Structures are given as C-alpha cells and as structure tokens.
Image (spheres, rainbow, N blue to C red):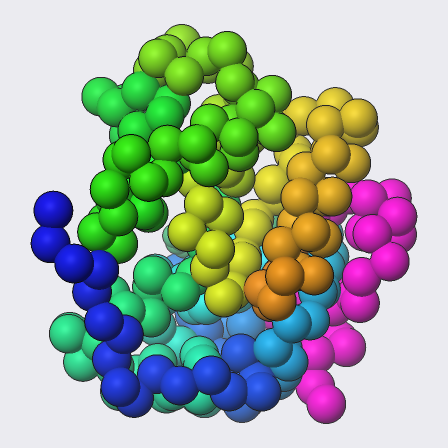
C-alpha cells in the first residue's frame, strides 16, 4: 500500500480545536434550529453537551463533523474556516475527527475487524502493523470474540461499541460522539467513558452529546447546555 498521506501544510496544531462565532442553522421547515451559537473548545479539553431532545445537539455536532454547513456565522476547525475548505482539504480535516453518529454508519459488508480498522486502512497503514491495536480496542469494548462477525448480526449496544472503536482507532485530534452510550448499560457506559477520558489524556479534544445527566456528572467534564437552539457555557 502507498505511504501515509501527508497532512495539508495549512493544518497546523492550534490552541483552539473548535471555534463557533454567532452560528445559526436552519432546515427548510425549521429555520431556527441553532441561534447565535458561540463555542470555544480548547485543544485537549473534554466537554459534555446536554439538553432536551430537539434542542439541536445532533445538528450542532453535524456542523462540527462537516456533515452540514452553518446558515450564518463562522465555524472554525483546527484554526481553519470550515466554509473555505477546498475539496482537497476537507478529507484531511475529516480524518482528524473521530465521529460516533447516532445511526452508527457501519459498513455491513465488512466484518468487525475491518470496520474498526477502516480509519487506519484509509490512512494507508498496513494490516500487519495495525492488527494488534485493532484487536486490543475491540477487546476493550467487549467485542474481542466477534472479530469475524458482520454488523447486521450485532445488537444495538454492540453496534454502538463498534462505532466507538472505529471512531477512536485513528487517534483523532477531535472526538465527537452523539449519544455514544444510549444503547448500553451503566457498566459499559462507564467503561466507554474511561476510554474517552484516556484518549483525552493522550491529547484528544472530546465533545460528547448526551441526555445522560448522571454520566455527564460522573465524568467531571465541563458542561455545555443547549436549549431550543441556544448554547450556554460555550463562550470563553
Ligand atoms: P437533539 O439532537 O438535541 O435531539 P436535533 O439536532 O436532532 O436535536 O434536532 C433539532 C431540531 O431540528 C428538531 O426540531 C428537529 O425536528 C429538527 N431537525 C433535525 N434534523 C432535521 C432534518 N434533517 N430536517 C428538518 N428538521 C430537522
């Protein structure tokens, strides 16, 4: 396989991983899903984003994973204006982000090992180099004995754990997780929280959206709160 892709020269380490300035977002039939959102996530910080269902948490995360574009205001990732990223730059920025989506987005035709290894394969690494790490991660999330299984045979909680393993496998600089513990019991939720905390200690910036107030409390992480499209606690 070819050598790992080099990062674009413009993407240098910056103190602020995420910056939102006056961000608004609307869908055609709900124009004010996010309103005047200001947010600063310092590199290496750990935040929980809470708020009632429909508050706009998933929408906010979709702006950060470049799945949606802000209707107004500015989204900056790793110091770069997201709206000015070229087609060539976008994949490099995406590769620095490990995202856990609510619908998991697993590839059903690949087995668990291949799903979890995807970020490393896309980064040009060789299977013989990454296999031990992938197997260790899958063991950590309790899937070590299912390496050959395919996603359709997994329970909701197992899919969630696989999605998390895949998201963090490439040691992303920014981890964004949408309700990452919504389908698992409390013991597993605490175990997954430990995983996010360990990656945070290694330097990753972490943002977790969750309706689980108790988990957010136990995490000791800083809190952001979204209420009808308005963000509290986000500005510095
Ligand atoms: P949360 O994650 O806090 O539950 P969401 O970001 O999913 O909130 O949704 C915020 C608002 O945007 C809700 O009113 C929801 O109905 C609306 N919404 C979400 N996704 C879409 C969409 N694809 N099209 C239209 N409206 C949407």
Looking at the image, the residue that sits furthest to the left is 2
- Placement of the C terminus among the 4 image quadrants: bottom right
Above or below for 75 versus 199: below
Q: Can residue 105 be spotted in the picture?
A: no
Question: Which x, y percent locates residue 17?
Answer: 53, 78
Q: Nearer the viewer, residue 69 or 174?
A: 174
Q: Is residue 115 left or right of residue 162?
A: left
Q: Nearer the viewer, residue 206 or 182?
A: 206
Magenta segment: does it hold 233?
Answer: yes
Magenta segment: does it hold 124?
Answer: no
Q: Is residue 172 left or right of residue 125?
A: right
Looking at the image, the residue that sits furthest to the front is 128
Question: Which x, y percent locates residue 41?
Answer: 63, 77
- Marks counted in the figure total 0
Residue at the spot 41% in from the left edge and 51% down from the top edge: 170
Q: Quadrant of residue 49?
A: bottom right
Q: Which residues are magenta?
A: 209-236
Residue at the spot 36% in from the left edge and 39% down from the top edge: 130
Residue at the spot 82% in from the left edge and 44% down from the top edge: 215
Q: Nearer the viewer, residue 76 or 194?
A: 194
Above or below for 132 versus 119: above
Question: Which x, y percent locates residue 155?
Answer: 52, 14
Q: Nearer the viewer, residue 132 or 88?
A: 132
Above or below for 72 versus 190: below
Question: Which x, y percent locates residue 217?
Answer: 88, 52
């Amino acid at each position: 396989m070819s050598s790992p892709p080099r990062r674009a020269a413009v993407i240098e380490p910056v103190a602020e991983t995420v910056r939102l300035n006056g961000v608004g977002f609307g869908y055609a039939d709900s124009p004010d899903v996010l309103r005047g959102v200001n947010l600063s996530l310092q590199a290496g910080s750990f935040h929980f984003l809470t708020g009632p269902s429909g508050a706009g948490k998933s929408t906010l995360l979709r702006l950060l994973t470049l799945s949606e574009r802000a209707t107004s205001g500015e989204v900056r990732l790793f110091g770069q204006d997201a709206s000015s990223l070229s087609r060539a730059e976008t994949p490099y920025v995406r590769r620095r982000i490990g995202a856990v989506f609510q619908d998991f987005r697993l590839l059903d035709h690949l087995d668990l090992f291949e799903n979890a290894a995807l970020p490393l394969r896309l980064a040009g690494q060789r299977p013989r180099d990454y296999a031990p790490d992938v197997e260790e991660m899958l063991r950590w999330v309790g899937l070590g004995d299912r390496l050959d299984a395919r996603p359709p045979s997994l329970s909701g909680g197992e899919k969630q754990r696989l999605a998390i393993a895949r998201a963090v496998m490439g040691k992303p600089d920014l981890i964004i997780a949408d309700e990452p513990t919504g389908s698992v019991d409390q013991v597993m939720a605490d175990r997954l929280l430990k995983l996010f905390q360990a990656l945070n200690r290694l330097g990753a910036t972490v943002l977790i959206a969750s309706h689980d107030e108790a988990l957010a409390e136990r995490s000791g992480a800083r809190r952001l709160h979204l209420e009808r499209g308005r963000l509290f606690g986000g500005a510095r």
